[in-house]
Amino acid sequence: MNGLLTQVRRLRSGVSALATFMGLAAGWNYVACAIFITVDVVGRAFFGVSSAATVEVTGYMLAIGIAWGLAHTLARRAHIRVDVLVNRLPLALRAWLHLVALALLGIFAAFCVWAAWSLVDESILFDAHDNTSLRIPLVIPQGLWLTGIAAFCLMVFVLLLEALLSLLAGQGAELDRLLGSRTLEDETAEALEAVEMARRGEKA
């Protein structure tokens, strides 16, 4: 059991690394989105020119950014949670509730992947394009959007597998650390890590 759990934890680390990359890409995507909008607004105001597709393209970028940030948000336990009651329960019960909550999230994520794939498949079938002058094939933004949701679903099910094995191995505390709400210690450690990275950047 412990050997299998170790392998699953390595798998989770790999998926978390992928989620981190996608989260960074989502962040830079929003920076690019802001620059695109700014340039378009300035162009229309002072030079009388516009991309004529700003609304559609930035809409794609926003949707893709949200989808690509989901897995990283889950891996970092940064999603919004209301755990006033759960945190007061005994560890044994709290661990099971974490597992049930993650399983329900997995069902929802799988449904989202199925719905997103159905949309992409339909766009491929009809060779759908948007109605702007760019005539962007819809399979491109929809495919990138699907990729983010699929990564989120993968993250959920890898965490679910690790949580289930941890529970069977009697490691309820480890499961609580993996899935529970972020603590003050977690926030402090993250802040110290950010400060240390800033210092290294200054020295470089």
Image (spheres, rainbow, N blue to C red):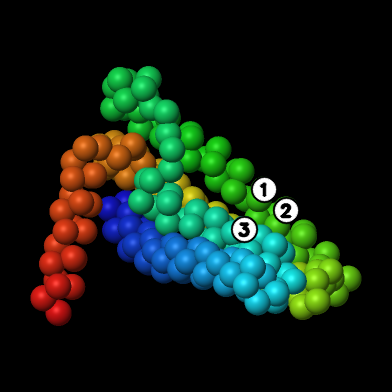
Viewer-side residue, 164 vs 125: 125
Any part of residue 145 in sight = no
User: Whole-Å distance between the Cαs marked 3 and 2?
Assistant: 15 Å
Type of amino acid under label 1? Phe
Question: Which quadrant of the structure image shows residue 166?
Answer: top left
Q: Residues within 10 Å of mark 2 (few under 14, many from 20)?
A: few
Q: Is 104 located above or below residue 65 in the figure? A: above
In percent of width and height, residue 117 lies at 72, 61
Question: Which quadrant of the structure image shows residue 188?
Answer: top left
Q: Are marks 2 and 1 in contact (CB under 8 Å)?
A: yes
Secondary element under disc 3, as helix, strand or loop, is helix
Q: Residues within 10 Å of mark 1 (few under 14, many from 20)?
A: few
In percent of width and height, residue 23 lies at 44, 62
User: Whole-Å distance between the Cαs marked 2 and 1?
Assistant: 6 Å
Q: Which residue lies at the image location 18% right of the left edge and 73% below the top edge?
A: 201
- In this rendering, position of residue 118 left or right of residue 57: right
Count how many numbered circles sit on residues in the image: 3
Viewer-side residue, 153 vs 64: 64
Type of amino acid under label 3? Ala
Secondary element under disc 2, as helix, strand or loop, is helix
Q: Sequence order check: which comes first, mark 3 or mark 1? A: 3
Viewer-side residue, 54 vs 1: 54
Residue labelled with disc 2: 115
Residue labelled with disc 3: 63
